Image: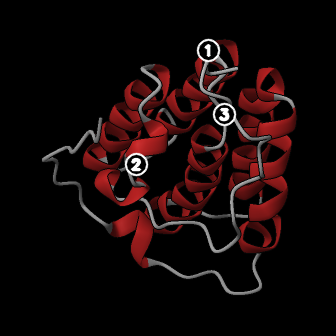
Amino acid sequence: MKHKLSFAVLATAAAFSFSGGPVAAQQVDIAAACFADAASCAALVQAQIAALEAAGLTGAELDAAIGQIAASVYSAAQATRNPAALSALSAALTTASASMSSPAAAAGLRQAAQVVASGQAATTQPTAFGLAPTTAPAPSTPPVNASGT
């Protein structure tokens, strides 16, 4: 079932571009790392945000970078159906939302976290939450048979 959200979020986080910056270079790594080890994803997100803060990013710039990280986490969530992994990825998005300076962007990440936890990330695009889609494809998953395994 397609899950469509009518939700407006300030797109500040998605509007900034960090070509060649630390987040853009690590975006694929974050998605792959969170897909491979969802239980460690929240700690990875926290470490990335701390590094960005230590580099002096604040306000809208920090929000944009966090938005890129969150889009990578969401990409990992779109590639799995494992309930434990989805729960861990949802926690990572909630962690990211706590560091946003924009209340609207933080609310968007919290709503994205709820969609991930519900297992609906595969049918909901990240743009529904003000996140830009990642430029790299989500990690591939093995085909799922008719029984869902």
Q: Which amino acid does label 1 sit on?
A: Pro
- Distance from Cα at disc 1 to Cα at disc 2: 30 Å
Q: What residue type is labelled 2?
A: Ser
Quadrant position of the N terminus in the picture: top left
> Which residue is labeled 3 in the image?
80
Q: Is mark 1 on a helix, strand or loop?
A: helix
- Distance from Cα at disc 3 to Cα at disc 2: 29 Å
The front one of 138 and 26 is 138
Relative to 106, 85 lies left or right: right
Q: In which quarter of the image is residue 92?
A: top right
Q: In which quarter of the image is residue 95?
A: top right
- Distance from Cα at disc 3 to Cα at disc 1: 8 Å
The front one of 70 and 101 is 70
Q: Which amino acid does label 3 sit on?
A: Thr
Relative to 7, 82 lies left or right: right
Q: In which quarter of the image is residue 72?
A: bottom right
Q: Residue at point 61% right, 18% down?
A: 147
Which numbered disc covers residue 119?
A: none
Give how far across and how far down residue 33 sits, in percent.
85, 43
Which numbered disc covers residue 83?
A: 1
Q: Nearer the viewer, mark 1 or mark 2?
A: 1
